[in-house]
Amino acid sequence: MSGAAARVVVVDDQRVVREGLVSLLSLLPDVAVVGTAADGDEAVEVVARERPDVVLMDLRMPRCDGVEATRRVLEAAPDTRVVVLTTYADDESVFSALQAGARGYLTKDSGAEEIARAIAAVHAGEALLDPSVQRRLLDAMASHGDTAAPPQVPAGNPDGLTSRETDVLLLVAEGLDNREIATRLFISEATVKSHINSIFSKTQVRDRAQAVAYAYRLGLVR
């Protein structure tokens, strides 16, 4: 990140995890921890007081869980970005958090580099999903769709996507980042970013997580 440090609030009901995250974040030069909270209700209060740039949000907490807290935080402070911290057991909650407006998704075993990258991405108005979380989101959506009618696959490329944009969308759905997509398709990262921006505009999704859901819904990914 460049410019002012991202102001971050850490939310987790386990004290050891909360303090560990604060210690880890204190080592990052572009991050300033401005508050902590032990549950969703407290998180809403701290965010209202501190107006942070980013909230690292646990999902499973007493009184008010991370999904509801995400919804309430974004209602009170729309400019704040939420990065969810999850475990492999939280698939349903992660999907709900996506619908609530979370912009980043990390597993709790993420290291400093992954957390720094997620904070930087959402602070810049982008989104970041841990590839393992993205894969499990797809699996969860697939399992929910077992009893539903098969998705209708439109003829040709949907919503006016070009063939190359569709290729990029499919690789996003596989969990590849821009650099990996550029390598796979033999194009520059700048071109990948341009394609992704066009995909977002044409499909009216706001981030990579919603793009994954879009690809699954139309049957482009199974």
Image (cartoon, rainbow, N blue to C red):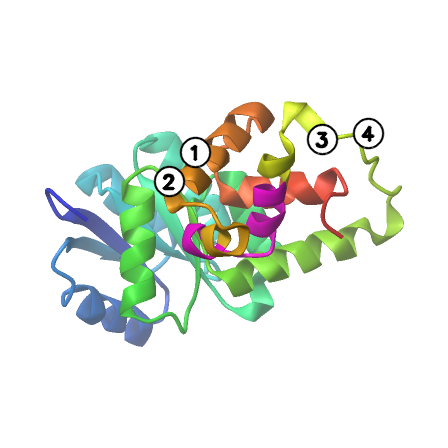
Q: Tag on residue 194?
A: 1
- Determine the image quadrant of residue 175: bottom right
Q: Is residue 174 left or right of residue 112?
A: right
Q: CA distance from mark 3 to mark 1?
A: 18 Å
**Three-letter code, disc 4:** Ala
The stretch of residues the image draws in magenta is: 167-180
Q: Is residue 62 magenta?
A: no
Q: CA distance from mark 1 to mark 2?
A: 6 Å
Q: Determine which residue is flagged by label 2.
A: 190
**Three-letter code, disc 3:** Asn
Q: Position of residue 189 (x, y in %)?
A: 39, 46
Q: Are marks 4 and 3 in contact (CB under 8 Å)?
A: no
Q: Is residue 171 visible?
A: yes
Name the residue rendered at 59%, 69% in the picture.
Answer: 89
Query: Which of marks 4 and 1 precedes in the sequence?
Result: 4
Q: Are marks 2 and 4 in contact (CB under 8 Å)?
A: no
Name the residue rendered at 51%, 40% in the picture.
Answer: 100
Q: CA distance from mark 2 to mark 3?
A: 23 Å
Q: Determine which residue is flagged by label 4.
A: 155
Query: Which of marks 3 and 2 precedes in the sequence?
Result: 3
Q: Tag on residue 157?
A: 3
Q: Is residue 95 left or right of residue 58?
A: right
**Three-letter code, disc 2:** Ala
The residue carrying pointer 3 sits among few (fewer than 14), some (14 to 19) or many (20 or more) residues within 10 Å by Cα, namely some
Q: Are marks 1 and 2 in contact (CB under 8 Å)?
A: yes
Query: Which of marks 4 and 2 precedes in the sequence?
Result: 4
Q: CA distance from mark 1 to mark 4?
A: 24 Å
Report the predominant secondary structure element of the magenta stretch.
Answer: helix
